[in-house]
Image (spheres, helix red, strand yellow):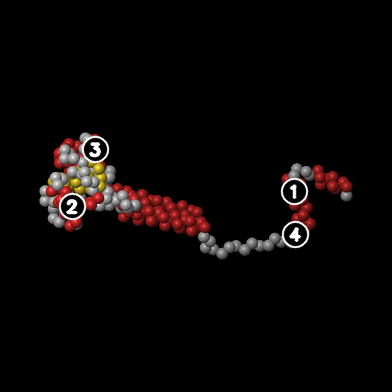
Amino acid sequence: MKRGTEIAVLVVAVAIVVAFGWSARGTDSTYSTFDTGPNGYEALYNVLAAEGVAVSRLTQPLGLMASGTRVFAVTKPFAYDRVDAKRLETFVKNGGVVVAFGEKGDKRDDGLPPRTVRLNVLAYRNVALERDPGAAATAYAALAGHGPVVFDEHVHGYDTERSMWSVFPAPVRIACWMLLAALLLALIGTNVRFAPALPVLPPGDRDSSDYIASMAQLLRRARAPHVAYERKDHV
């Protein structure tokens, strides 16, 4: 593979990676407190922290939630199984508060207790709070004043036992694999021979003129042409 072809392949691969990243920029923004995109909840999380609310994130299964938690907050999507639903019911019976940021129709089989405080998930996104910062007051009223607040990030794929690769969106993974394939092709093209080697022709027969020319070149490089003249005088 020629060098120009290798560079072209790499340029195309990088362009594809950038295109995937740009296209996934808005569509893959989720209602996560880690997310800085338009749908993310990082702004609300930071506002609560700035107002002195003890907020933290749950990046483990629900059964490992800290015992001191008093408010459990979860953003769409959420669908807890029977075991976790039972845990949340017990949590509420013991005085805990569950706050769910969702949409209409999320009540059906979502595993949340009947007394769950439900808020509109669209009203507290980063882009929504940028337009109307005062909307955070409603969420603050539902979350603050009850004790430590935990946002469930495990439902969004964040897990302390998982690798960073596992939480990458699918388009980003595909783009990374394509870039890796392009680099691999470039390495193969540089180091693997696909054509037969050219035979090395043996040197032809030399005569006395070759010897004289070689000695003359040697003397010139040694800056000693006078040696040839002195030698000639003695012959």
Q: CA distance from mark 1 to mark 4?
A: 17 Å
State if disc 2 and disc 4 touch (CB < 8 Å): no
Pointer 1 or 4: first along the chain: 4
Q: CA distance from mark 2 to mark 1?
A: 93 Å
Q: CA distance from mark 4 to mark 2?
A: 95 Å
Mark sitting on residue 124: none
Foreground mark, 1 or 3, reads 3
Foreground mark, 4 or 3, reads 3
Q: Amino acid at mark 4?
A: Arg
In terms of secondary structure, where does tag 1 sit? helix
Foreground mark, 1 or 4, reads 1
In terms of secondary structure, where does tag 4 sit? loop
State if disc 3 and disc 4 touch (CB < 8 Å): no
The answer, for residue 172, to whether it is visible in the render is no
Pointer 4 or 2: first along the chain: 2
In terms of secondary structure, where does tag 2 sit? helix
Pointer 3 or 2: first along the chain: 3
Pointer 1 or 3: first along the chain: 3
Q: Which residue is tagged 3?
A: 49
User: Residue 94, percent across and down?
Assistant: 14, 47
Pointer 2 or 1: first along the chain: 2
Q: Amino acid at mark 2?
A: Arg
Q: Amino acid at mark 3?
A: Ala
State if disc 2 and disc 3 touch (CB < 8 Å): no
Q: Which residue is tagged 2?
A: 87
User: Residue 118, percent across and down?
Assistant: 14, 47
Q: Which residue is tagged 4?
A: 206
User: Residue 18, percent across and down?
Assistant: 36, 49
In the depicted structure, whether residue 137 falls above or below residue 115: above
Q: CA distance from mark 1 to mark 3?
A: 82 Å
